Amino acid sequence: METFVNVGLIITSIALIASVILQSKGAGLGGLTGADSGSVFTARRGIEKTLFQVTIALSILFFILAITALFLGR
C-alpha cells in the first residue's frame, strides 16, 4: 500500500509541476494586445479556467497523498 501511495505522489507532483508551468506560460498570452497583463485582472475562460481547476484538484490530491504517506510510514 505504501508503494502505491509513493508512486501516486510522484505522478501527482510531476502533473502539478507541469500544470503550474503551463499556467505561467499562458499568462503572457494576454499581453499580445499591448496592454500590461500584470496589472489587469481578467476572468479565466476556456482552457485557462480548466487548467486552473485542474491545478487546484492536483494540489488537493497531493496533500491528501502526502498525509496518507505520513500515516502509513508510522
Image (cartoon, helix red, strand yellow):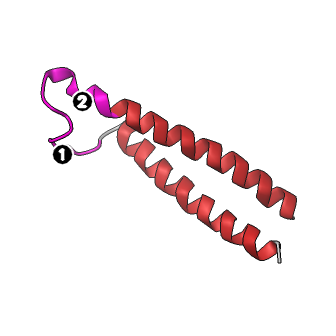
In this rendering, the answer to whether 29 lies above or below 41 is above
In this rendering, the answer to whether 69 lies above or below 19 is below
Query: Residue 41 — which label?
Result: 1
Q: Tag 1: residue type?
A: Phe
Would you say the residues marked 2 and 1 are in contact, meaning their CB atoms lie under 8 Å apart? no
Query: Residue 32 — which label?
Result: none
Residue on which the image places disc 2: 30
What residue is shown at x 60% (from left), y 60% (from top)?
61
User: In terms of depth relative to the viewer, which is nearer, 34 or 47?
Assistant: 34
What residue is shown at x 20% (from left), y 34% (from top)?
37
**Residue 64 falls in which quadrant of the image?**
bottom right
Does residue 35 belong to the magenta stretch? yes
Q: Which SS type dominates the magenta stretch?
A: loop
Q: Indicate the quadrant containing the C terminus: top left, top right, bottom left or bottom right.
A: bottom right
Horizontally, is 32 left or right of 58 in the view? left
What residue is shown at x 36% (from left), y 31% (from top)?
26
**Residue 24 falls in which quadrant of the image?**
top left
* Residue interval drawn in magenta: 27-44
In this rendering, the answer to whether 2 lies above or below 15 is below
Q: Mark 2 Cα within 10 Å, few/some/many (few <14, many 20+)?
A: some
Q: CA distance from mark 2 to mark 1?
A: 10 Å
N-terminal-most mark, 2 or 1 = 2
Q: Tag 2: residue type?
A: Gly
Q: For numbered disc 2, what is the local secondary structure?
A: helix
What residue is shown at x 55% (from left), y 42% (from top)?
17
Horizontally, is 61 left or right of 24 in the view? right
Q: Indicate the quadrant containing the N terminus: top left, top right, bottom left or bottom right.
A: bottom right
